[in-house]
Structures are given as C-alpha cells and as structure tokens.
Amino acid sequence: MAVEKETAVIDIGDDDSEVPEPRRWYRSTLFNAFVIGLVGFIAPGLWNAMNSLGAGGAQSPYLVNAANALVFGLMGFLCLFGGPLANRIGLRYTLFLGAVGYPIYSAGLYCNNRYGNVWLVLVGATTCGLSAGLFWASEGAVALGYPEPTKRGKYMNIWLWFRTGGPLLGGLIVLALNHSPSLKKKGKVGFETYLVFIALQCLAAPIALLLSEPHQVQRSDGSKVVIKAEASFAKEMRALVNDLKRKDILLLLPIFWAAYFNQYAGNFQTYYFGVRARALIGFVGNFATLLASQLMGTLLDYKNWPVKKRIIFGAWWVLFWHIVAWTYGWIINEKYTKSKPAYDWTDAGFAEGFFVLVFWSFAQQSLQNWMYYLVSTKTDNISQLSRFCGILRGQESFAQAVSFGLNTRNWYGGRVPLAVNTILLGLAVYPTYLVVRDHVPDVTDKFGEGSSGSGRTLDEESVAGRKVEAEEGEKLAVAR
C-alpha cells in the first residue's frame, strides 16, 4: 500500500511477479453481484412492487404520494453525501444501513391499510428515505465498480434482474392474495399483503453484511478494484465539491432529473383500473423491465464494438423508445380523460391501457441501464464512482420527490405531470448529446481487450482520460 499526503491508494495489483492471493468464491465479482442483487431484490425491489400497484396498494394515491415525496427528498440528500460517507465507513456497512429502513415503511402502509393510521406512514417514509439514500450510493458503486471492465454490462444486468425480480415476486404475492372476482372494482389491496413484504424485507440488512469491501474483491482477470480514498471526511467533501463542478456531471443532471420523473404512472393505475387488474399489472409489467434490461445489457457488452460506439447506439435506442412510449401514452391518457374507465383484466379495453404502462417501463429501464453504464465508464476509481453515483442518483431522487409531490393533487387528466415530464425529457436531449460527444471512456482492461471508441486501446484511453483530469486539477495517484 502506498500512502500520499492527501490520498490513500491501494495497489491495483498489475505486477505479475506478486504471489497470487488464494481464490475465494465469496470474494468473486459474481458472488458480490448476487449479494447486491439479493439486497436490491428484497429491500427496494419489494418497495417497488408495492408502488407498482399504484399508490402502494392504497385506494387513494394522495397520502402515499406525499409519503413518497418525503422518501425521495431525504434520499436525495443522503445520496449526495452517501458517497463520501461510504468511502469512510466502507461499502458493506453503508449497504447495511441502506437496507434497515424499508420494512418500517412497509409497516406504516400495513397500519394505514388496516387501522387508518397516518403517522407511521410518515415515520416509515422518513426512515426509508434515510436508508435508501445510503443504499443507492453504495449499490451503484458496487454494481458498476466491482466487475471487470469488459463484463460491466453483464453484471449491471444481473444487478438489475435481481432488483426487478423483487417487484416480480412482490407482484406475484399481491396477485395471489388479490385475485378474487370481488376485487374487480377500484379499492385497496388486503392488509395481509404487507405482512409478507415486511417479513421478507427484514432479511435484507443481514444479507448486506456478506458484501466484500473493494480491496477484498477478486476479479477473474486478476486486476484489482481501484481505490483512491481521501484521508479524511473533510477531504472527501472537498472531492465531492470538485466532482460537482465537473462540466460533464452538470450536463448529466437534466437527464437524471427526467428519467424517473414519471410518477403519474401510479395515479394512472388507480384512476383507470380495478384492484385485481392493478395486481396483474404489478406482476406482468415487470417482464417489460426485464426485457429492456436484457436487451440494453447485451448491447452495452457487445465486444465487436468499441465502448464509445455502444454508448452512442444505446442513446439512439433509448430515444426511439421514449418517443414511442410518450406518444402512445399521451394518446391513451387523453382518451381515458374523456371516457373515465375502470378496467378489470377481463374487459375488452384493458390491453390498451396496460401497454401504456409497459411502454413507459420499457423506455425508463432502457434509459437507466444506459445512464449508469455511461457513468461507470467515466472513472475506474471506485471512490470517485461512489461520489458520481451519489450525485446523480441524488438528483434523480430530488426529481422523484418533486414528481410525487406534484401527483398529490388530482390534476385534470394528469396533464400537468405528463407535460412537465415530457418537457424535461426534451430539455435533457442536448446536454446529454454534449456529454456523449465529448466522452472519453476511462476503461482499463488488464489484457488489452477492446477499445474505447477512438481507435486507441483501453489502456491508452485510460492514460488520455487521466491527463484530462490532471488538467482539470484532479490528482490520480495509483501505486503499481
């Protein structure tokens, strides 16, 4: 280990003369991908399952939307400062703390559903928001920073499959408990649903402790996770401020705001579908998310194309599906504003409304995979990647807080939240284009496979990227 005045650096292990460390399966990138996936599956995955019902399974969306606005507002602040905190206390304990608040939120929904209790919903929203901010800051860094560079798309896909598997299992549970013909009409799910979710979410925190710290991870190619840990929390905060000033990070803020702003989807379900139809949508709709993740992950790991080309083609793919989803969504929403249906899955018009939600989910998941892959190619230093993920995920959370707050009001036809989201997506196109145009992937591969997109090898691009960072005043110290 080499220690400088301001920075602690862990050897990245490129010296082939060193005695190889014994391989342990629980230190592999695959095992750690499964750990982060399982925690995501149980904690935020089941949280998403409740919200995929629309309004967390409640009859009216407004209290739950207010609670979710509180969740994402707190999450935004904790995401922002979660990167520096994770670099001080370690990713394992950050992930542990990031999982403990979710069952309290579910308990609040249970008490509200069964007894009409309101205060525990807000307490649960507070604890969930604090936990979730730490969870997302650590989860993104692990999912993007632990894998070998040539396998990032694959491992990101594993992570997202697990996280989507949570809503899938949750949706199946909800559907099994809420499929009775008596639930054809609008209403709320049975309280038993929440008890199952609470029990499962309590498992997330102990599973998080199985995670390896970055210096313990054993990659299949023999390389080490690059760590440049600042010497103190104050210096971590200074590094965070420097990252916040980066032009490329500032230009990415609009797309991170726009990506998950569409929380009107939950209102759309409560307005136009019965309880068991919402349960079916909450289950089947997840297959669109899984398909989107699989397709984008395959594209982003296509080794016959350089990294930059994959990013460019991925951007066009995302743009196409957003145009399709939002055009179709506007058309059907305007139709329903006039007719005001309440569909069960046996009704003839169910499919057209269902596909509004499918297209929105498919486009949204495609964009998320692409965004985080782009961010993962901006640095090979997991400490800096933690800060990047915290900054951008924090902005994403602030946007969702605003969106949930906006959807606490019954806007006529949902036109206001839909219009705001459409405008945000449009405004995000040009700044994102500038980022992609100027992007030089910082991707290192010990065996020199692939290229970054400019005709140079990955190692050459890594050097070039570091020179650019040095010109911007950032120091990168790596002991070899």
Image: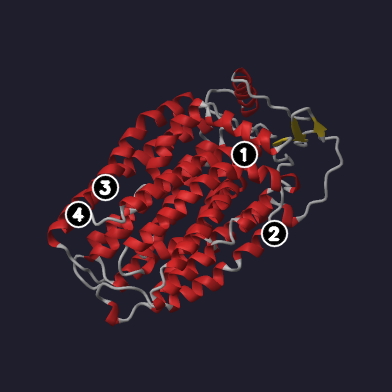
As drawn, which residue projects farthest toward the front?
119
Q: Is residue 470 above or below residue 277?
A: above
| In the foreground, 65 or 20 | 65
As drawn, which residue projects farthest toward the top?
471
SS at badge 1: helix
Mark 1: which amino acid?
Pro
Q: Which mark is residue 413?
A: 4
| In the foreground, 266 or 456 | 266
Q: CA distance from mark 2 to mark 4?
A: 47 Å
* Marks 1 and 4, the one that precedes in the sequence: 1
Q: Which residue is mark 1?
A: 149
In the displayed structure image, the side of residue 369 where residue 180 appears, left or right: left
Q: Nearer the viewer, mark 3 or mark 2?
A: 3
Q: Which residue is mark 2?
A: 210
Q: CA distance from mark 1 to mark 3?
A: 37 Å
Tags 1 and 2 touching, CB below 8 Å: no
* Marks 3 and 2, the one that precedes in the sequence: 2
Q: Is residue 442 above or below residue 257?
A: above
Q: Which residue is mark 3?
A: 418
Q: What residue do we see at 32% from left, 81% from top?
A: 180
Q: Nearer the viewer, mark 2 or mark 4?
A: 4
Determine the image quadrant of residue 70.
bottom left
Q: Position of residue 93 (x, y in %)?
A: 68, 54
Q: What residue do we see at 30% from left, 66% from top?
A: 60
